[in-house]
Structure formats: structure tokens, C-alpha cells
Amino acid sequence: MPFLRPFTTFFAALAGLRLVAGHASIWHPSMYGFNVTQQTFPYDNRPVSPLINMTFDQWWFHGHLGYPPNDGDIFELPAGQPATTEIACNKGATTFFASSEGGDIRVADDPNAVCPNSPTSAFHTNGFDDLTGCALAIAYKSNVSEIQPEDFTVFSVNQTCVWTRFTDFQVPARMPACPEGGCHCAFFWIHSPDSGGEQNYMNGFRCNVTNVTSEVPLAAAQVPRRCGADSAHDKWHAAPGNCTYGAKQPLYWFQAEQNNMFEDTYSPPIYTDMYAFKDGAQDDIFQDSYIFLPDPSPTAPLPVLNTTVMSTLQFTPPLRKRQIAAAKRKHLARRHWMSRVSF
Ligand SMILES: [Cu+2]
């Protein structure tokens, strides 16, 4: 019945279009849930489905721990270089369209489209100035069932995410090697409050650090704090002492269980300077990244970076000593100044 062919093609295309609506996730075969479809769960739990008010089992790794990647499917993170990811509202908009229910929906004249033939509201932004960033985090554990939320450390941020399908994340040059069997990573995104509800996104995947040159482990990740200027809430000045510096956990927000962020609907925690997530590689997440790292508070002194390991330049030992001494002097002067203005 060849005459039916155009009709089935037409309906297949319609089905594809229906699947396109809204949201976004990372896409790669190393993901947990890479082949989860709209029918796999009793509810739509595709990787792009947003996570709101969910139980821990539902939101942690998107509830996809039972859908691991195939052996050997691992995402490589080259230390000191960018890792290019694909982010899209549907698998059919990525290189991996072949295993998508709706097939290939990419458009030739816009290969970087996150959501082809859709307005930017489909991925929750009113435009380039309304982007809130997304992040990759890593846990140095090969056994996924051993990972706890506080084991993840954000190692790279792209503040202009989600905007393009191909999205680069700079990998810190000093990332140490993963244990045997590799690490686990996850993609995190919370969108702008101007374009949709309180949606969290988390997609876990297997990863491994390559190009390793350092053995210094990551520091224990701390909970991020809102510390940037926020004109939308009449907060005109940043409070730099109130930031969490160094290794930070991802933002776990608006779930039914195990949140570490408690901001309201209109103040979503985001991966920008507002929470001291600078754009690019998070180069200060290692155990030796700071020579002074005070507990954050509105009146806390600023931390002091260990400039000898932060710099890519190799300093000679006498210069290194002098630099540490200079940093300490600077810190003491700053603390003296802080104590004078506090009292
Ligand atoms: Cu959404």
C-alpha cells in the first residue's frame, strides 16, 4: 500500500513536532537515561523533562540510575582544554538523532539550534541577556551508587547557556586523574525566572579526565551562597565576603527532598557571578588553591588565592616565597581594614 506512505510519514513528523516542546538537556551516549523515552516511565521522564518538587529518587540522576550507559561509553574531559557538549530540547536535534523517537529534526541552516523551529522560550530564555548559565560537576567515584549530593563539585560553568546546541565547558588544567573505572559527572541547569517555572535539570553521565598533569585532589565542596548584586531585588551591591569561594556543590533547589538551596520562586539560584560561579573553568577547586579561605559572611575578609599554583607560569622558588609573603601582607592589611570598618 504505497499510497499510505505519505500519510504515515506525515504523522511521524507530527509526532516528532509534538515531542519538541520545551526544556533542554545534555545529550551523549555516556548519559544515564540516554534511551529513556516518553513511555519508559509512568510519567514523562525523558532526560529533557524538568525536575520540580520531586522525591530524591526521582530527581537524583533524573531517576535514571537503572538506565546506565553501555560499557565503554564515557565522556572525555581534557584537562586545560574545552569539552564540547551537545544541549538540545530533543535528542533528534543532536548528532545522536538516529536513536530518537522522532528522528532527525536538525535544520541545515541553523546547525547550532537548541530547539529547531521553536522560539527561545522553548529553552526558557527571553534572549541572550536573559541567560543564567549551566554547569558540569564531577564526583571522583566510579561506583554510581556510592555518590552523595555533596560529592559533586562544579568544575566548569558556561554562563551563556542554554543558547547554542554545541556548548563548550572549559576543563581546569589541574584536574587530577579519575579512579579506576572513571568518574561520574552531571549537567546542571536552572533557567531564568523570566521564562518559565522552578525547573531544575540534572543529567548524570560517565566521565574521565584526560591530559592529566596534577595530582592535587579537589577540596571538599561547600554549599554556594547568593552574594552578587541583584537589582531585580533592590540589592545594588555585591557582598564579596559572603560568597562561597573554591570548590562548590551544584545547586539543589525546589525538590521535595535534599535541597541545599532554599531561595523562592523569583530568586532561583543560578550558575553566574551571583553565586560566585565565574564563567569557564573553576580553577580554584583544589585542596591547595587558597592560602587563606575564611568562612563566608557579609563581613568576612576576602580569601587569598595561592597564586603560585593558580598561575600557569612556573615561578622560581624565591619569587614564590616572596609572592606568598606579599599575599599574606595584603590579607593582614585587608583584615585590619575590615576590623576598623566593622566596629
Ligand atoms: Cu522546561
Image (cartoon, grey):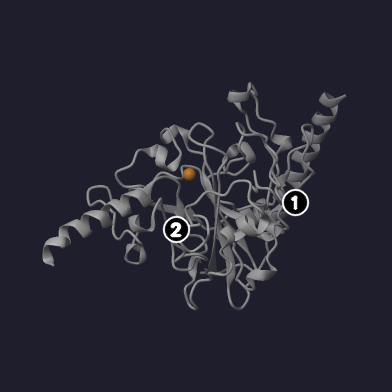
Which label number is shown at residue 5? Answer: none
Amino acid carrying mark 1 in the image: Ile
The residue nearer to you, when weighing 21 against 124, is: 21
Q: Which secondary structure lies at badge 2?
A: loop
Count of marks placed on residues? 2
Image position of 172 with respect to 145: above or below: above
Residue at the extreme front: 1
> Residue 106 in the image: x percent, y percent?
28, 54
Which label number is shown at residue 38? Answer: 2
> Residue 343 in the image: x percent, y percent?
88, 24
Q: Is residue 280 visible?
A: no
Image position of 209 with respect to 86: above or below: below
Image position of 237 with respect to 50: above or below: above
Distance between the alpha carbons at the discs numbered 2 and 1? 50 Å
> Residue 62 in the image: x percent, y percent?
57, 58
- The residue sitting at 68% across, 57% down in the picture is 149
Q: Are marks 2 and 1 in contact (CB under 8 Å)?
A: no
Choose top left, top right, bottom left or bottom right for residue 148: bottom right
Sequence-wise, the earlier of marks 2 and 1 is: 2
The residue nearer to you, when weighing 145 against 294, is: 145
Amino acid carrying mark 2 in the image: Gln
The residue nearer to you, when weighing 298 against 129, is: 129
Residue count near mark 1 (Cα–Cα under 10 Å), binned few <14, some 14–19, many ≥20: some
Q: Is mark 1 within 8 Å of ligand 1?
A: no
Image position of 208 with respect to 313: above or below: below
According to the image, label 1 marks what residue?
Answer: 291
Q: Is residue 276 visible?
A: yes
Residue at the extreme right: 343
- The residue sitting at 59% across, 77% down in the picture is 181
